Amino acid sequence: MVIPKLNIVSALAALVFFFLPWVSIECNGKRLATQTGVQMIVGATTPNPAFQSRMPTPRKEEKQSLGASYLAAAALIAVASALLVAFAGLIKGSSDDEFGAGILCTMALAFLLLQLALGFPAKREMQRALDERGQVSQQKNALEPLEKSIAEQLAGGLEIRPTQWFYLELAALGIPVLILGNALLDRIKAKET
């Protein structure tokens, strides 16, 4: 009975971690903004209050998005489904439902590891925006070298880093994955004897 409860706690923790900052957007070592797991799905950010007053206010017609993460969306769906399956298994008292929660957590973990390997959408979108600024500055003559130099320095100092909450998300998903692996090994050993 401990294993299904552990699956529920792990899946619940993974769901909660989606609402905590996963990504830190930094320029030259200073945090400009953060993104939670949910914000990563829609491309939103939470600006650092220390820099928010210095940043220009976007016009209302401008849509500012740092790119949607479909892998994070798939992971969120898998985590929510794993929580429901684990809870249903606890209510029914069925040990087979722990496999379902474990498989869903494995899928969520795979989606997030793939996102980590591919890079976060915020990095691509910010790089694209800086490249567009560089192209616009090429059309102007007077300040072109200065604007190009500034854009290159910004691009060089821009870093998108996962925070500890992202790694805790991976750890929370790893627990049901390990439980699933152990359960599968136990079934294989039982068939051999």
Image (tube, rainbow, N blue to C red):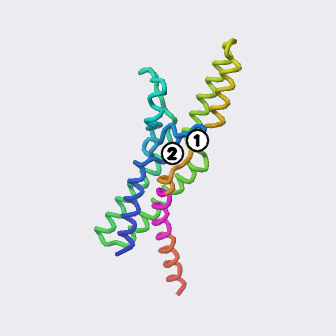
Whole-angstrom CA distance, mark 1 to mark 2, is 14 Å
Local crowd at mark 1 within 10 Å, few (<14), some, or many (≥20)? few
The image shows residue 16 at horizontal and vertical percentages of: 38, 53
The image shows residue 114 at horizontal and vertical percentages of: 57, 51
- Of discs 1 and 2, which sits in the foreground? 1
State the residue in front, 184 or 140: 140
Q: Say whether residue 175 is left or right of residue 153.
A: left
Task: Please tell me which residue is depicted at 47% across the width and 49% down the height of the picture.
Answer: 74
Q: Earlier in the sequence, mark 1 or mark 2?
A: 2
Stretch in magenta: 168-179
Q: Is residue 164 above or below residue 53?
A: below
Q: What's the mark number on residue 107?
A: none
Q: Say whether residue 156 is left or right of residue 162.
A: right
Q: Magenta stretch: dominant SS?
A: helix
State the residue in front, 7 or 23: 23
Task: Please tell me which residue is depicted at 47% across the width and 37% down the height of the picture.
Answer: 43
Which residue, given by chain and number where applicable, does mark 2 sit on? 23
Q: Is residue 155 above or below residue 140?
A: below
Disc 2 marks which amino acid? Val
Within the magenta stretch, is there residue 2? no
Which residue, given by chain and number where applicable, does mark 1 sit on? 29
Residue extending furthest toward the bottom: 193
Local crowd at mark 2 within 10 Å, few (<14), some, or many (≥20)? many
Disc 1 marks which amino acid? Gly
